[in-house]
Amino acid sequence: MKRADFLKRITLFGALFVLFAHSMEATETKNLVLIETPYGTIKVRLYDETPQHRDNFIKLVESQFYDSLMFHRVIKDFMIQGGDPESKNAPANAQLGAGGPGYQVPAEIVYPQLFHKRGALSAARTGDQVNPMKASSGSQFYIVWGKVYGENELKSMEQQKVQQAMRTHFNNLAFAQKDSIQAMQANNNTAGLDALEKELIAKTEAEFMLNPDKGRFTAEQKAVYTTVGGTPFLDGEYTVFGEVVEGLEIVDQIQRCQTGTADRPKSDITMTMRMVAE
């Protein structure tokens, strides 16, 4: 290869590298949000593992949706919650927490990779009875504070989560047999119902014997929850879509504020948000 051709290829490669690097930088910088509060600034990073929540949050931030909204629900040693559009300039007696942009975001529960460690940014949602698919509020979010757990306390909670996971698995198996169950109930076939129940219990137990870690905390979760803290009882139930990377001390100050009816801070805590570069 001639020297001139070689240099030309190097120059072209360099140009492509610059374009690639710029593209990567643009992608990365899209994930950082500054939340300005009266207490100071909180910087959060949005996760690429939850793209629908990431893109929705970016859209709302860039449209200034969150500006002048309140952290309307604060519970010490638990979390701080905001994002209700009805909280903007809301009078002291206003009932807050039901507002949104008019849509929900499908659940993106990436568990156990993303969990409720201290500083986790998560999506609020309505309860399972009216929202069995665990879809997220279109705008309301909370930032986890939680607490540090002892090993025995965490072990007890883990056992409860395993039992809950077993019940969920059993209910899913039963739902798949709903037509047969309804027919047996209509015919008062108690023997058939008892036999099916035993069969589904056996299948559930077999599933958890084959997968002994199912429903249990990972080593990373145990390490974080026993040192840094968080809210492990929310794991697998709500979408975690980001985390605080700077300003955790501001979250601490907010979660310590005085609150009144419905856990609303006695002094309004407003917010403004903007996207920032690395």
Image (cartoon, rainbow, N blue to C red):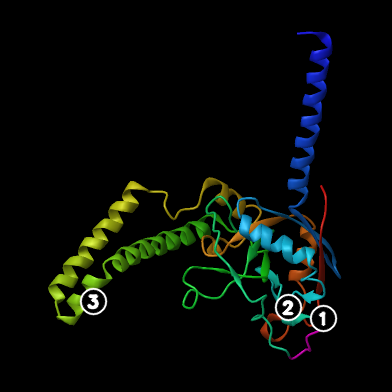
Give the quadrant of residue 255: bottom right
Q: Looking at numbered disc 2 in the image, what kind of residue is underneath it?
A: Pro
Secondary structure under tag 2 reads helix
N-terminal of the pair, mark 1 or mark 3, is 3
* Residue at the disc numbered 2: 85
Q: Quadrant of the N terminus?
A: top right
Asked if residue 193 lies in the magenta stretch, the reply is no
Q: Looking at numbered disc 3 in the image, what kind of residue is underneath it?
A: Gln
Q: Which mark is residue 182?
A: 3
In this rendering, position of residue 136 left or right of residue 22:
left
Q: Position of residue 130 (x, y in %)?
A: 49, 78
Q: Which residues are magenta?
A: 89-93
* Residue at the disc numbered 1: 267
Q: Position of residue 235 (x, y in %)?
A: 54, 60
Label 3, label 2: how far apart the Cα atoms are: 44 Å
N-terminal of the pair, mark 3 or mark 2, is 2
Label 1, label 3: how far apart the Cα atoms are: 54 Å
